[in-house]
Image (cartoon, rainbow, N blue to C red):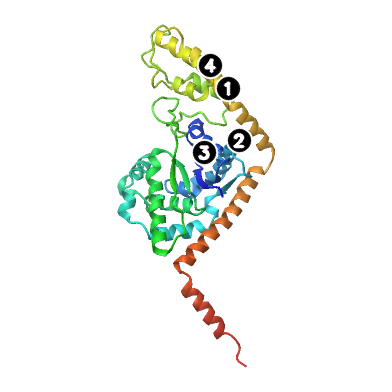
């Protein structure tokens, strides 16, 4: 029996090259070896964007994210792609798991304050849902009883929390859950085209998987390089330079990259030439993704059918997990007794 993996994205917009390197590339490859569950984590989006406007915008984002996954090679015949909010079991599991972890344990997670800062929420106004974000993640992970969770180093603590909750549940009620393990991503964070922060839609420094060739060329042309290099004959710095980081990530021609680096350090090549080659490399990488996107988009309703069928499958999986949880806990024992006695009392007497 294959081991199981849970991974996914929040539907906040179209995916970019940073998403591809950081997660999408890995999860597509994992489909061959593992039983994969890809979650469209729309409930998690509510922790920082609970407004009606944002919720309505998610309708398009959900389709965009799944279209990006499918265009990159996610296969619904090999993996379960599902919408988190439409699996009722996650709400009940989240509530039960909240009883098995302390507030101190949650507030001590380093990512909590960072998420609040990124959402422009001050510490005095952090909502309960954001504090409990890792508990909902635990419900996501344990619902399919996942063995592995691919995450970056910054989210390793969240998987450790899910292990703690699974361990405590098993200690209290019996062995129901495997203890999930971290599958660390080997890919570093991809810097944005501005060279100042990681690639992000909100910072307007991203190249999206759905960008057309001309858009890619314009974005690469504006990319940040070595600020000290005023003219092409000035020796430049390669290390940490975004154009070379992107070349190494998306240009398969190693000898060309090494030649660029040598000439760049010597002041014997212009930024324009290096960028033109980079734009060609990125577009060559994106071309097959674009082609699959066109094919999938032409099949009207296909993306929605993938989400629908995957969500129904996940509902069945989740109900099995919930059934085992309830049985182990004895949580419905009193209700079952009440139902039995009530039915007996309602029998007609002859």
Depth check: give the residue in front, 1 or 10: 1
Q: Secondary structure at mark 1?
A: helix
Q: Residue furthest front?
A: 1
Tag in front: 3 or 2: 2
* Gap between marks 1 and 3 measured at Cα: 21 Å
Q: Quadrant of residue 299?
A: top right
Tag in front: 4 or 1: 4
* Gap between marks 3 and 2 measured at Cα: 15 Å
Residue at which label 3 appears: 13
Q: Is residue 199 visible?
A: yes
Tag in front: 4 or 3: 4
Residue 153 % position (x, y): 39, 38
Residue at which label 4 appears: 277
Image quarter where the C terminus lies is: bottom right
> Which numbered disc, 4 or 3, marks the residue that appears first in the sequence?
3
Tag in front: 1 or 2: 2
């Amino acid at each position: 029996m294959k081991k199981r993996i849970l991974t996914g994205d929040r539907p906040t917009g179209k995916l970019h090259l940073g998403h591809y390197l950081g997660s999408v590339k890995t999860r597509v490859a994992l489909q061959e070896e593992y039983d994969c569950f890809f979650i469209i984590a729309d409930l998690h989006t509510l922790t920082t964007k609970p407004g009606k406007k944002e919720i309505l915008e998610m309708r398009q984002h959900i389709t965009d994210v799944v279209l990006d996954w499918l265009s990159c090679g996610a296969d619904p015949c090999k993996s379960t792609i599902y919408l988190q909010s439409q699996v009722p079991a996650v709400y009940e599991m989240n509530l039960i798991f909240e009883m098995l972890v302390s507030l101190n344990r949650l507030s001590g997670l380093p990512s909590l304050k960072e998420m609040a800062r990124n959402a422009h929420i001050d510490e005095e106004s952090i909502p309960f849902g954001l504090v409990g974000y890792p508990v909902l993640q635990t419900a996501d992970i344990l619902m399919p009883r996942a063995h592995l969770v691919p995450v970056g180093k910054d989210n390793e603590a969240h998987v450790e929390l899910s292990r703690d909750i699974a361990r405590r549940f098993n200690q209290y009620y019996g062995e129901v859950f495997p203890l999930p393990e971290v599958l660390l991503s080997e890919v570093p964070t991809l810097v944005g085209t501005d060279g100042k922060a990681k690639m992000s839609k909100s910072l307007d420094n991203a190249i999206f998987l759905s960008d057309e060739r001309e858009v890619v060329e314009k974005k690469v042309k504006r990319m940040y390089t070595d600020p000290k290099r005023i003219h092409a004959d000035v020796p430049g710095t390669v290390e940490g330079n975004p154009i070379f980081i992107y070349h190494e990530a998306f240009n398969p021609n190693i000898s060309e990259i090494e030649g660029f680096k040598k000439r760049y350090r010597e002041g014997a090549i212009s930024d324009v030439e290096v960028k033109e080659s980079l734009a060609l490399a990125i577009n060559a990488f994106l071309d097959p993704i674009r082609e699959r996107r066109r094919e999938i988009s032409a099949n009207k309703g296909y993306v929605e059918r993938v989400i629908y069928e995957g969500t129904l499958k996940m509902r069945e999986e989740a109900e099995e997990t919930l059934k085992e949880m309830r049985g182990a806990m004895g949580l419905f024992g009193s209700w079952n007794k009440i139902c039995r006695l009530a039915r007996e009392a309602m029998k007609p007497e002859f």
